[in-house]
Amino acid sequence: MAAAVLANRASEIEAPKIIVSSSGTSSWHVGESAHLLSEQTWKSVGYSYSHQARQFMAERFDEVDLILAMDLSNHENILNLARSDEDRAKVAMLRSFDPGADSVEVPDPWGNEIDAYQEVLVMVESAVSGLLKTLA
């Protein structure tokens, strides 16, 4: 969901140019589309995004400037793949960009009802707003 929000809102700033991709740290769901409730949630507020799950690999550090983790487990998994201090410096928690956040983690709504996805959307939108202010 965070990739959908950021991809749709990236045009709010002129520079730097933001190219969004998404991956998980496990091989679960590789090749699958986004969860139906996640997709329904972002579409319900007007975001358009196509997603196919893939696994994060260490080579991605060479291709990106910033890696945003949603939770501490994934943050740790990403850092474990880092090959250098330069790689580690590219990793941040998405919610760390939301000054009003009560936690740095975005809870995984998987297995819950649509309202949990909607709550996550609010968190993600707020964090993306903070990120875009930081980058602008």
Image (cartoon, grey):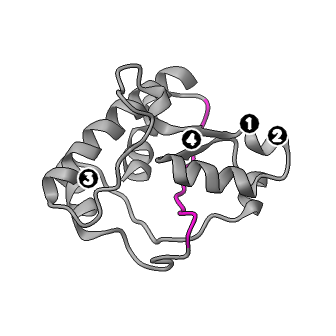
**Image coordinates for residue 130, horizontal then vertical, percent:** 44, 25
Residue annotated with mark 3: 42
Residue type at the position of mark 1: Ala
* Disc on the earlier residue, 3 or 1: 3
Q: Are marks 2 and 3 in contact (CB under 8 Å)?
A: no
Of badges 3 and 1, the one in the foreground is 1
Query: Marks 2 and 1, Cα distance to the nearest angstrom?
Result: 5 Å
Residue 66 seen from this side: yes
Dot 1 falls on a residue whose secondary structure is loop
**Image coordinates for residue 19, horizontal then vertical, percent:** 57, 48
Q: Which mark is residue 86?
A: 2
Residue annotated with mark 1: 89
Please state which of residues 103 and 19 is positioned toward the viewer in this rendering. 103
Residue type at the position of mark 4: Ile
Residue annotated with mark 4: 18
Query: Marks 2 and 4, Cα distance to the nearest angstrom?
Result: 20 Å
Dot 4 falls on a residue whose secondary structure is loop
Of badges 2 and 3, the one in the foreground is 2
Identify the residue shown where x is 49% and y is 29%. 96
Q: Report the span colored magenta.
A: 16-26
Q: Are marks 2 and 1 in contact (CB under 8 Å)?
A: yes
* Res. 103 image quadrant: top left
**Image coordinates for residue 21, horizontal then vertical, percent:** 54, 56
